[in-house]
Amino acid sequence: MRAALCQISSTTDPKANLELVRDGVRRAAAGGARVVLFPEATQCRFGVSLKPIAEPLDGPWATAVREIATDHGVVVVAGMFTPTADGRVTNTLLVTSADTHLGYDKIHLFDAFGFQESSTVAPGSKPVTVEVDGTTLGIATCYDIRFPELFRALADQGASAVLLGASWGSGPGKVEQWELLVRARALDCTSWVLACGQADPGDLGTTAPTGVGHSMAVGPLGTVVGGLGGEPDLLLVDIDAETVEDARRTLPVLANRRL
């Protein structure tokens, strides 16, 4: 299965960001991609009030993304925000195509490095997988990458690849942490990890996590198959499910767990 990682730099305008999705899907489909992964906060970047932006999964923004996916015969995964009853929003990764339309609500909220995501975002509670052409894909978001138990849970549910959208916070050592964590999670669950982050937008005058780029695709034994720099770009990668089976025979960490 060929997947595309569309590393973009979202604006604060959901309509403009929809055009970034449209262009990215067009280019990814032209390259033979079946799954097209965009970053967390594709609908709207962090650093502004998210409540006025939030829409349900049957709202106009998610519906438009589904139409784009359907037109190109692909599955699109893209970050958006959905409303909640308590006045906050959920940080949702939309998974949509002609046959699929669902969301994963980010479980682990970024209450770290001086940022308090939980003040405006309500946590999800349920791991999510989706099957595409016979391959089970797990879904995760940004700060989730620091929690190996989620990735092992997704592997237990049959995932041979995890698609992670992110808007990584910048700072000393943060790119190095990102690269280390993506590779480590692939090894923890002996699965592919495709991690697509927001491109580095430069100084936007906000302390919110707005991206550092460096999207990457990592195989089930921690090998980096492809990666990007800080600028907006597109990465195509072929996911080979047989390599997962081979890795789990060679390194049976899932079977050998004791705790």
Image: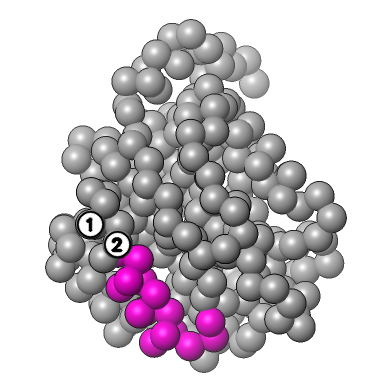
- Per the rendered image, the range of residues in magenta is 11-25
**Callout 1 environment at 10 Å: few (<14), some (14 to 19), or many (20+)?**
few
- Residue extending farthest bottom: 52
**Mark 2, secondary structure of its residue:** helix
Instruction: Note whether residue 141 is visible.
Output: no
Residue at 32% x, 20% y: name it: 242
Left or right of 148? Residue 172 is: right
Badge number at residue 1: none
**Mark 1 highlights which residue?**
30
Q: Residue 88 at x, y = what percent?
A: 58, 79
| Dominant secondary structure, magenta | helix
Query: What amino acid type should be assigned to the residue bearing mark 1?
Result: Ala
Tell which of 32 and 84 is nearer to you: 32
Residue at 47% x, 71% y: name it: 42
Mark 1 vs 2: CB contact within 8 A: yes
Tell which of 133 and 235 is nearer to you: 235
Badge number at residue 27: 2
Residue 202 higher or lower than 197, as above or below: below
Residue at 43% x, 9% y: name it: 249
Reply yes or no: does residue 14 show up in magenta: yes
Query: What amino acid type should be assigned to the residue bearing mark 2?
Result: Arg
Quadrant location, the N terminus? top left
**Mark 1, secondary structure of its residue:** helix
Q: Residue 49 at x, y = what percent?
A: 62, 87
Residue 100 higher or lower than 12, as above or below: above
Residue at 23% x, 71% y: name it: 68
Quadrant location, the C terminus? top right
Q: Residue 37 at x, y = what percent?
A: 39, 56
Write down the quadrant of residue 119 in the picture.
Answer: bottom right
Left or right of 189? Residue 230 is: right
